[in-house]
Image (cartoon, rainbow, N blue to C red):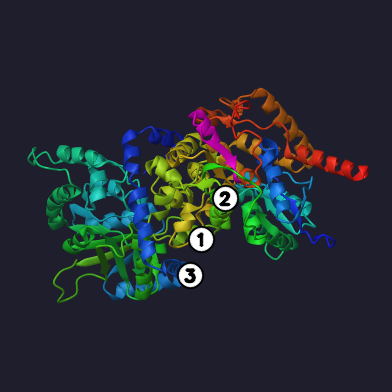
Amino acid sequence: MTDPASNRPRVGLFVTCLVDMFRPSVGMAAVKLIEHAGCDVVVPRAQTCCGQPAYNSGDRPDAKALALQTIAAFEGCDYVVAPSGSCAGMLKAHYPRLMDEGSNDHARAADFSERVHELVAFLVDVRGLTSVPGNFTGKVTYHDSCSGLRELGIKTQPRRLLTSIKGLELKEMADSEICCGFGGAFSVKFPDISNAMVEKKSANIAAADVDVILAGDLGCLMNMAGKLKRQESSTACRHVAEILAGELDDPPIAAALDKR
Amino acid sequence: MQPTAHDFKSNARAALGDKQLQDALSGLPGGLVAQRAAARARLPEFDGLRDYGRDLRNHTLEHLDVYLERYETAVKGAGGHVHWAANGDEACAAILRICQDAGARLVTKGKSMVSEEIGLNARLEGAGLEVVETDLGEYILQIRHETPSHIIAPAIHLTQGQVEADFRREHAHLPAGRRLVDPAELVDEARQILREKFIEADVGITGANFLIAETGSSIIVTNEGNGDLTQSLARVHIVITSIDKVVPTLDDASALLRLLARSATGQEITSYTTFSTGPRRDGDPDGPEAYHVVLLDNGRTELLGSEFREVLRCIRCGACMNHCPVYNAVGGHAYGWVYPGPIGAVLNPGFIGIKEAGNLPNASTFCGRCEAVCPMRIPLPKLMRHWREREFAGGDTPFTTRMALKSWAALARRPWAYHLLARLTSRAMRVASGRSGAFRWLPFATGWTGGRDFPAPQGRTFQELWAARQKQAASKRSAR
């Protein structure tokens, strides 16, 4: 709970499995931003995955078990923050639906749900952040990931923080609200359709003529970055937290290591 | 219609490689999607009206038995007949009997998806009747021997050039040098051909957008007026529709009509909204001698009593498919049965079984755009997920998927093992990718790497970085 001495709220970081395994620098950027917003960060070891692969494949029992595991792992946190609209949406909107209404588990999931926020929405809506540590000069565009946009209403928050960075020019691309074609297991089960969808996305990115394409979800970013790389595009692909935190030492997603 | 939903993946692949289809589909965002957005912007209470429509439909479904009986009584009171059909076979048999009793040879038809659902045309033609589709899109499909690829714009998968070629081939008796460039010219030509059929027809069959319990009326909405001619010029009018179309009152129907046209085509109201109540009365200048309604169940009662009830709120506007990125990529035929797009992904498994249609509710990224535009606020992604749950619980999920899921879940429920494997995988993939930053090919993701690279991990997990940071902080504290 909130440290009475410092009056800093205790934020549990839900890392997300993709950030943990593929791009931990996004997690470090998230920590920096949450601390910048006047909070203490804890990272429970008992967290793994939010359970979406099971939930969206129809495996409710496993999804429920993972939900209960996650809820238990974050007990004692004032807030639970995830650098992903998709995972935050699962924690916030879907965990209560996994539990039988009226049950003790349902009450726990509902209480947990109230404490869950997507990273950028947390910074803006809960902590009232108006400026960020990052500085960046160049043109960027922002892709609205589906769950963040439609489940959590994240639209203006990242744009507000991005435009607070001097030298950063935010350009809107066409169809920023249309799915990139990732969809978790969808991209594996229906790779042809997924590929056709990300092709439309990459055409819109190209037409926006920017240096960096940003988004709040690593799944979508890996999909878009993979496509851009295959097309030998020079547009870099990064999680929005990296720019906001000014954590740009690591090469962009899918970029070669020696190419800085 | 023989379903090919089990072949969805290969259907989709073929559709993606079909240049003409892709050209035809590319008109959707600037067409129906943009038109709906404009219509919505012009009506400030649009979203409030959606809430109203949702509640109204929920109420009707809650008391469906009552409203259907009321409807039947009202139809009979107006001199019409009601035929209840448990399935497509019964519905076709009832319609055929009515046609035969009327001594019919020629049947004209307005647009009806329910008639597609029951395979009506084939059944009637099999019995020696001539059936003519009078909706322009449906007429085009009939001469091409195709099925609709969209529920309100059935020929949306075709380009104008294809239609022109079909007309020149089919209407060989017309002058070869005639102009067929503007859509208006195509419509004119179809009108000339169809006019004769309207006059000669013995039976006219239409669908219904709504049925009104209070008055026993059926409503059709069209932009061509073909439905009016179909139902008023023939001696017998048959309405083929389903039990979920009933609404309590005329006022209720009006509220839903305000949502329907806006959601479908972006119109305030369609060019024609036609109410039919019973056959011609004494003193009426025109109208059919007999009026029949065939009410199809075909699995709807089962949906009503299941976790899929909300899908029965659907008013068939097509907004979900217009806005679906998967539908936009592959078109409607890939879905392999009558109803395409998100609504089809929820309805079709109910009608043809999850074993046949299992691909459909899986072929969604759950992007949620369908639910966001649905005038009846049907939670389509949630309902698709319910089908996946049925599939999983029934053992119909493919074995490899099931095994992969189960092993992954077992791991995810053991954090220490999970973190260990995450570390090893991250490290191994980082080493295997060299300095390239991505894989051009990955053994377990060849579908993915066929069209795009797979980004390589940075090499260490966040849990590792975090543990190192905590350790550093602790040693700093103890040094102090």
Q: Which of label 3 and label 1 is nearer to you?
A: 3
Image location of residue B365, percent across then percent down = 52, 45
Q: Residue at x 30, y 65 (%)?
A: B269
Amino acid beneath label 2: Leu
Q: Residues within 10 Å of mark 2 (few under 14, many from 20)?
A: many
Q: Which of label 3 and label 2 is nearer to you?
A: 2
Q: Are marks 3 and 1 in contact (CB under 8 Å)?
A: no
Q: CA distance from mark 1 to mark 2?
A: 43 Å
Q: Which mark is residue A162?
A: 2
Q: Secondary structure at mark 2?
A: helix
Residue named by callout 1: B309
Image location of residue A101, percent across then percent down = 67, 63
Q: Residue at x 36, y 54 (%)?
A: B34
Q: Nearest the camera: A128 or B25?
A: A128
- Magenta stretch, residue numbers: A225-240
Q: Which picture quadrant has residue A108?
A: bottom right
Amino acid beneath label 1: Arg
Q: Are marks 1 and 2 in contact (CB under 8 Å)?
A: no
Residue named by callout 3: B55
How many tags in the picture?
3
